[in-house]
Amino acid sequence: MPKLFTGPDGEPRCSWSAAAPEFLDYHDNEWGFPVADDTRLFEKLCLESFQSGLSWRTILAKRENFRAAFAGFDYAKIAEFGDADRARLTEDAGIVRNKAKIEATINNAGRMAELVRAEGSLAAFVWSFEPKREELAEPQTVSTSAASRALSRELKTRGWKFLGPTTIFAFMQAMGLINDHAKGCVVRKKIERARSEFVRPGR
């Protein structure tokens, strides 16, 4: 069973929320709450892609810089990025200057436009991969799942890049497609309530 951390209010939380000062707010107010907004979902896919091989702390610290650099993660605008934008991004010390990941983000913006035309929204598409409760492992004991492998495979088929099953699993944890807060974590019940009240897109 994953270890818990006692927060400043005396309540137990997932142990990772104690790893850095900025993690507590992210853990309590973002991680795991269900999201149906296409811009936020696309942003998270992009940031998870950039995180590959790095720590989430690095990406979280640079999140506002990423938003500024990538037009607020407006996929229609990013899809139009040209050589000047590529040069600007590879010189931007405020983000992760990985050319392959920058190219993947621009590519994925184009694929996002195609997906929205085909499926109606990114939200409806990704939430169609929400796993059933009986398919879930114990919280925080795995780094991939059948659902994350299926979603990753489908995105790859549609031409998306840098979104393997482990990256997609982290996306699903963060965006509330599963509740992976540790058992005993004070936020876990809040997530369960939010998920029970959440209207799944496309339904």
Image (tube, rainbow, N blue to C red):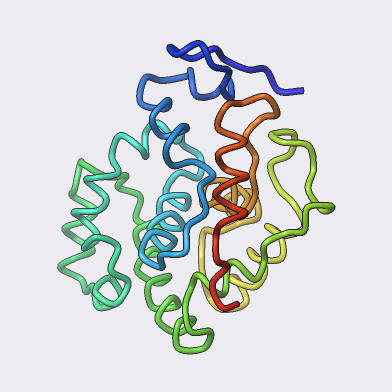
Q: Which quarter shows the N terminus?
A: top right
Q: Position of residue 50 (x, y in %)?
A: 42, 49
**Residue at horizontal 58 percent and vertical 18 percent from the top:** 12
Compared across the picture, whether 43 is left or right of 156 comes to left
Q: Position of residue 113 (x, y in %)?
A: 40, 81
Compared across the picture, whether 133 is left or right of 60 comes to right
Compared across the picture, whether 182 is left or right of 84 comes to right
- The image quadrant of residue 114 is bottom left
Above or below 12: residue 181: below
| Depth order, front residue of 96/42 | 42
Q: Position of residue 32 (x, y in %)?
A: 54, 44
Q: Given the current orientation, which residue lies at the most extreme bottom position?
A: 118
Q: Given the current orientation, which residue lies at the most extreme right position?
A: 134
**Residue at horizontal 66 percent and vertical 30 percent from the top:** 182
Report the number of discs: 0
- The image quadrant of residue 109 is bottom left
